[in-house]
Image: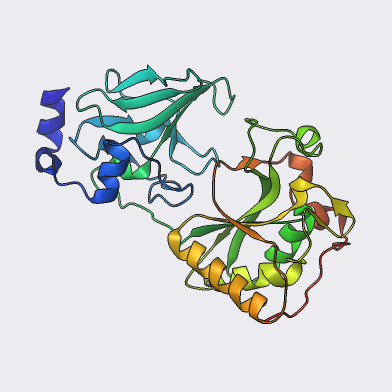
Amino acid sequence: MAGFRFKLFPYLASTMNSLTDFEKHVLLEKGTELPFSGEYCDLMSAGTYLCKQCGTPLYRSTDKFRSSCGWPSFDDEIPGAVKRTPDADGKRTEITCAHCDGHLGHVFEGEGHTPKNTRHCVNSVSLTFVPDEGEVPARASKETAIFGGGCFWGVEYMMQQQPGVLSVESGYMGGHVRQPSYEQVRTGTTGHAEVVKVEFDPAKVPYETLARLFFEIHDPTQADGQGPDIGHQYRSVVCYTTEAQRETAEKLVQELRAKGYHVVTSIERAHTFWPAEDYHQNYYANKGTTPYCHAYTRRF
């Protein structure tokens, strides 16, 4: 592996000990970047992913797949490149670079995403991508926002009407059950919230516009419910994927409170996004109807 590494990528030998503070936090202190915030989350160009710390080739792009979890996902590694170590509590298995022991993330099995039935969930910040010769990395101008405001059908529909939004997907976030089903979440005991994942082009619509829209298409003063849908799973929540999003959401909440609104919306760091069942996606568009408990109300 060492000969392979320096033969292909000699310039990466100098990256050891030149990590940024956040890279050190993840690679050395076993930290985690926010979901959907990493530069390689949606990258599908042909090439090789290397360890950010030592330059060892870890993953090939042919083993990368879209899992919607918020981090780059691979169903295989370059042989001998990745080491597995069970966490102290035995609940998860950590993956590290076999050459320098830099923290990469965790590996999960049995989820059924690909025929190999394995998902290496890796922090983008732990990696460096080197495109194949002649390949130009296709980095789309795209960011991700996550909002929960009652039944996700209505929030999904309203967000889909906003120009600059690329896609909206309904799902679950924030609970303690992995890969939850709707039947589990609807009990209100899993801790999840019904949310939508909004992918948007920031050149066409800034995050603040989406956040303002969110506060105006549901009632942010109603706790644990929205209209007739009552339960903790229907709570009002902004799940931020960057610190800039957190600051924007907090600013808007303060603006609303200054106007006299008793906002109960929680602002939380985004965690794993679990896509909802297919029959929940594009619900109103497929039915040809409009939301019954979401409507636009100007508040700003």
Percent x, y of residue 93: 43, 21
Where does the C terminus fall, quadrant-wise? Answer: bottom right
Q: Is residue 255 above or below residue 181?
A: below
Q: Is residue 53 left or right of residue 200?
A: left
Judge left or right: residue 77 versus residue 267. Answer: left
How far across and how far down the image is residue 28, in percent?
26, 36
Quarter residue 149 falls in? bottom right
**Above or below — where is 20 with respect to 55?**
below
Q: Kindly identify the residue that appears in the image at 66 percent across and 75 percent down.
A: 257
Depth check: give the residue in front, 257 or 33. 257
Q: How is the image coloured?
A: rainbow
Q: In this orientation, which residue lies closer to the viewer: 30 or 15?
A: 30
Q: Quadrant of residue 52?
A: top left
As drawn, 186 above or below 197: above
Identify the image quadrant of the N terminus. top left
x, y percent for residue 71? 46, 41
The answer to whether residue 131 shows anywhere in this view is no
Q: Position of residue 234 (x, y in %)?
A: 77, 51
Residue placed at 49% from the left, 59% from the top? 143
